[in-house]
Image (tube, rainbow, N blue to C red):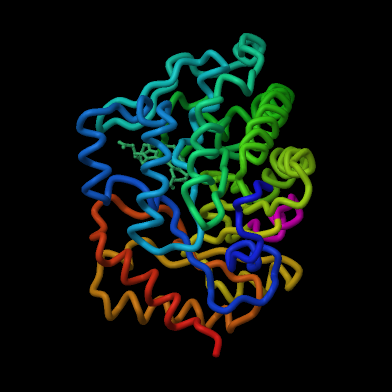
Amino acid sequence: MSADTPMESPFLAACRRQSVPYTPVWLMRQAGRYQPEYRALRARLGFLELCRSPETAAEVTVMAVEQLGVDAAIVFADILLMLEPLGVGLAFERGDGPVIQRPVRSGRDIDRLAPFDPRALDHVYETVRRAVRALAVPVIGFAGAPFTLASYLIEGGSSHDWARTRGFLYADPGAWAGLMERLVPAIAAYLNAQIDAGAAAVQLFDSWVGCVPPAAYRTHVLPHVRSLIGALRPGIPVIHFGTGTAGMLEAMRAAGGDVIGLDWRVDLDAAWARLGEGVAVMGNLDPAVLLGPIAEIRRQAANILDQAGGRPGHIFNLGHGILPQTPVAHVRALVDAVHELSARS
Ligand code: CP3
C-alpha cells in the first residue's frame, strides 16, 4: 500500500468488516457520460485516447470524487483495455459500443492469442499513481473477470443473450478451460500491477456471468475465479461483483472475495443472510432510482441502509453503473443521504 493512502478510510474498514463512523459509499461509473464535464472532454477525445492518457484519465477519476464527496475513487479505465494486448483488435465506435475485430470462436483462435504483456497497460498504472497522489480517499483498481472478458472475446462485442458464449462453453469445454487458463494469469498480473501502483482495493467485474445456470458457473467459472483471486497480492481487499447472480451467490462467495457486489434484483438483507456474516457486501440501489425525485432517492437509500442494519461490512453502491441520463444533482443527493442517514452517533 502506498504511503499516502489513508489506513483509516471508512471504505477500507468496511471491506474488512470493521466498524465505521458512517456507511462508506462510492458508485460504479461515478466518472462518465452523466457528467457535462466528461461529455465535453469526450467531444474532443476518443474513449480509448482518454483511457491512454494518464494525465486526463486521472483528472476524470479525481473530478468524480471531488464533485460527489464519495469515499473511494475507481481508476478511470475499462475492462476491455486488457484485450488489446492479446492482439484481437479493440475499437469503440460511437454509439455502437465496443467491437472486437478478431473474435475467438475456436480452440485455434485461442492458440493465436498473443502472450499477455502487462507492460502494454503501463498507462493504467500511471493513472493509478497520479490519482493516488491527488486524492485523500483510496483508489480502487479493477479488471474484468475471466467469464466476462471471454464473453466479449467470443461475441466480438456486447450481446443481448451471450448465446455464442454459452454455446461455446457447452460445445467445447476443453477450449473454454484453455481460454480461462490464458485469461486468469493475465488478469492477475494486470491487477497486481495496479496494486503495486497504489490501488488500495481491487474490483473484479463479472458483469454478465448471471447469464449461465448456477451449475455451469460452478463447473466452468468458479475454479478459475478462485485461482485468480488466489494469485492476487494478499491483504488487499477484493470486491467480487456480478449482475443477475441471484441464483449463484453462494457459488460466487465460494469463488472468493472480501466483498460481494450485489445487483438490485436481490434484497440486500436476504442476500447477505445467504452469503453469511463472514463476508462484506456492496450495493445495491437500482441505478434507475436516480432518475426519480430526490425524496424517493432518500427513501430508497434509507431502505437499503435499514436492510444492512448498521452491521460492519456494508459498502453502499448502486446495483450497476450510473445511467448516462442521470442528473448530477441526484447523484450528489444520494451520496449526502447515505452519509447523513448512516451516521453513527
Ligand atoms: O467510473 C468508473 O466506473 C470507472 C470507469 C469504468 C468504465 N468502464 C468507463 C467507461 C469502469 C469501471 C468500466 C467497467 C466496464 N467496462 C464494465 C464492467 C462494469 C459494467 O458496466 O458492467 C464493462 C462491461 C465494460 C465494457 C464497456 N465499456 C462497454 C460495453 C462500453 C460501451 C457501453 C457503455 O456503457 O458505454 C464501455 C464504454 C465505457 N467505459 C464508457 C465509460 C465511461 C463510455 C464511453 C464513452 O465515453 O462513450
The span picked out in magenta is 248-257
In the image, taking residue 311 as reference, residue 50 lies left or right, namely left
The image shows a total of numbered marks equal to: 0
Point 36% across, 30% down: residue = 50
- List x then y, in percent, for residue 25: 48, 66
Ligand 1 quadrant in view = top left
Any part of residue 146 in sight: no
Any part of residue 15 in sight: yes
Point 46% across, 15% down: residue = 89
Q: Nearer the viewer, residue 127 or 258?
A: 127
Q: Kindly report the secondary structure that dominates the magenta region of the rendered protein.
A: helix
Residue 263 in magenta stretch: no
Q: Quadrant of the C terminus?
A: bottom right
Q: Splitting the image into 4 quarters, where does residue 339 fall?
A: bottom left
| 345 versus 82 height, above or below | below
In the image, taking residue 151 as reference, residue 258 lies left or right, namely right
Point 36% across, 43% down: residue = 60
- List x then y, in percent, for residue 154: 53, 25
Q: Splitting the image into 4 quarters, where does residue 156 fall?
A: top left
| 75 versus 325 height, above or below | above
Residue 255 in magenta stretch: yes
